[in-house]
Amino acid sequence: MANELPDLGSYTDNIISTAEEDRISKQILYQVNQSPSVIHDVEIDDYLASLGNNLLMNTSISNRHIEFFILNDSTINAFAMLGGVVGVHTGLFLAANSESELASVLAHEISHITQKHLPRIIASQQRDSYKTALGMALAILISRSNPQLASGAMQAASASAAQNTLDFTRAHEKEADREGIKLLDRAGFDVRGSINFFKTMQKSSQFSDGAAPAFLRTHPITSDRISDIEDRLKDFPYRQRVDSDNFYYVKGKLRAFLEEKSSIINLLKENIKNKSYLNESGEHFALAYAYYRNNQIKETRQEINFLQKLKPANPMLLNLDATLLIKEGKLNEATDLYQKSLSMFPTYRAFVYGLADHYIGFKQSPMAINLLEKYLSIYPRDPNLYELMAKAHAKLGNILLQNESLAEAFYYRYNLREAISLMDLAVRSKDGNFYQKSRVETRLKELQREEMLFKKALN
Ligand SMILES: [Zn+2]
C-alpha cells in the first residue's frame, strides 16, 4: 500500500518559471478570446468558473487562478493546458447527467494542473522550455478550437506532432483520476459521479458511429483505469447530492441556443408532455429560451410565468425575465426588475450588463457609468464592463474616456497590441481634463513596457 503513486521521473519544478507560465497563459487566453468557437456567455462562464473554483479551493494550489472556458464542439471532451487554462466542450457539458459528473471531469483536469503534468512532460523531453511550451499550447488550441485554421498541411502536421508529444501518459491519467476523486469528495460532490460519467461516455461511443469520443482518446479509459477508480470509490461513503437549478438551466440555455430552432422547440414540448426529462424546471427553462430565441414573445412569457411559480428567485430566470420585459417594451418594469434582482444577487454580472445596456439604450448613460464604476471595483479585470463603459462614454461624446475604456477591454481580452493603439488614441484625444490626460499617459507607458518585456521573452 505504501508508495501508491507511480514514478513519474524526476523533474525540476522551475522548468517553466511563473512569469513564463503567466505569459503562456495570456497567449492562450488571447486565442480563446479570438476563437469563434468559444462561447462567451457570462451566465455559462460564471457557472463553470464557480464549479471549478469550488474544486480549486480544495487543492494545495488554492491561491492559483485557473481560467475555464467553454467551446462549441459536440464531441465529449475537456482539456487542460499550460498556464492554468481548462477548456470544456459543450458536448461534454450536455452529456453530464448530474453536477457531480460534470465536476468529476473538471476535477480530473484540475488535477493534471496541480500535479504539473504538462511541465513534467516538457521537462522529461528536455526541450527549450518556454518557446516549445508556448508553441505547443497554441498549436493544440488552434487545432482544437478552430480546425479550419490548422488545415494547412504544415500547421496540421505540427499541431498533431505537438498533440502527440503533449499527450498524458497512463501514469498521469491514473494520478489525475485519484487526485480528482479526492478533490470531488473534499468539495462535497458525489464521488461516484466519476464512474457514472465514464459509463455515460462509453455508452455514447457506442452510438456515435463507432468512434470513441475525443475525451476517451486523449484520456484513454482502460479497464485498468476503471477498476482502479472503482477500487478507490469503496473508501468513500455513499453521498446524495442535490444538483443546483443552475446546472440544469445552463444546460437548458445551451440546448436552446445550439440546436436547430424549431426542432428543439418540438423536442422540448414533447419531453414536457411525456415527463421525459432529468429536471422539470430545467426543461421548461430550455423551452423558454428556445421560444425567446425564436422571437415567440407570448410563449416565452408563459414559460417564465410557469417557472416563477415553481422556482421564484433564480437569477437565470430573473435575467431572462428582464430581457423579455425590454422586448415587450416594458422599459420601466425592466429597470425595476434589474434593480430588484441586483439587490437579491449583488454580484451577479448578467444583471449589471443588462441594466447598464438598458440605461445606455434609454438615454441614461450617466446612470450606466455610475453602475459600471461600482462594479469595476468588484471585477477590475472584466472586459465586458469596460466595453459597456466605452459605449456609455461614446453616447456622451467623451472621446478620451471612450478610448481609454475600450483599450482596457482589449487589454483584459489579452490583445495587448490593440490595447496600446487605443490607449494611444486616448492620449491624443482633444478632450479630457488634466487628471484624465496624465492617467492615460501613465497607463500607455505601462502597456508599452509590458509589450517590450513580452517581446524580449520571445527572443
Ligand atoms: Zn486526463
Image (tube, helix red, strand yellow):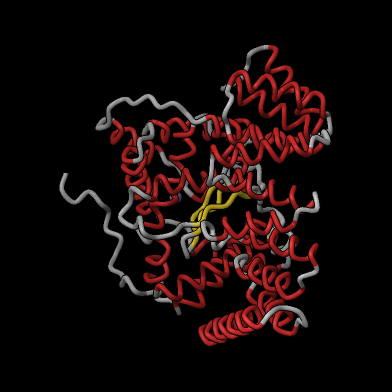
Name the residue rendered at 71%, 76% in the picture: 422
Name the residue rendered at 79%, 65% in the picture: 396
> Which quadrant of the view contains residue 323?
top right
Classify the position of the C terminus by image quarter.
Answer: bottom right
Q: Does residue 49 sit above or below 294 in this rendering?
A: below
Seen from the viewer's position, the closer of residues 150 and 181 is 181
Seen from the viewer's position, the closer of residues 408 and 193 is 408
Farthest left residue? Answer: 2
> Which quadrant of the view contains residue 91?
top right
Please say whether residue 78 is visible from this viewpoint: yes
Farthest top residue? Answer: 274
Seen from the viewer's position, the closer of residues 374 and 283 is 374
Give the left or right position of residue 227, taking residue 417 as reference: left
Please say whether residue 39 is visible from this viewpoint: no
Classify the position of the N terminus by image quarter.
Answer: top left
Question: Percent position (x, y) of residue 331?
Answer: 78, 39
Q: Does residue 138 sit above or below 301 in this rendering?
A: below
Seen from the viewer's position, the closer of residues 383 and 333 is 333
Name the residue rendered at 55%, 81% in the picture: 450
Question: Percent position (x, y) of residue 310?
Answer: 59, 19
Q: Does residue 239 sit above or below 194 in this rendering?
A: above
Name the residue rendered at 31%, 72% in the picture: 12
> Which quadrant of the view contains residue 146?
bottom right
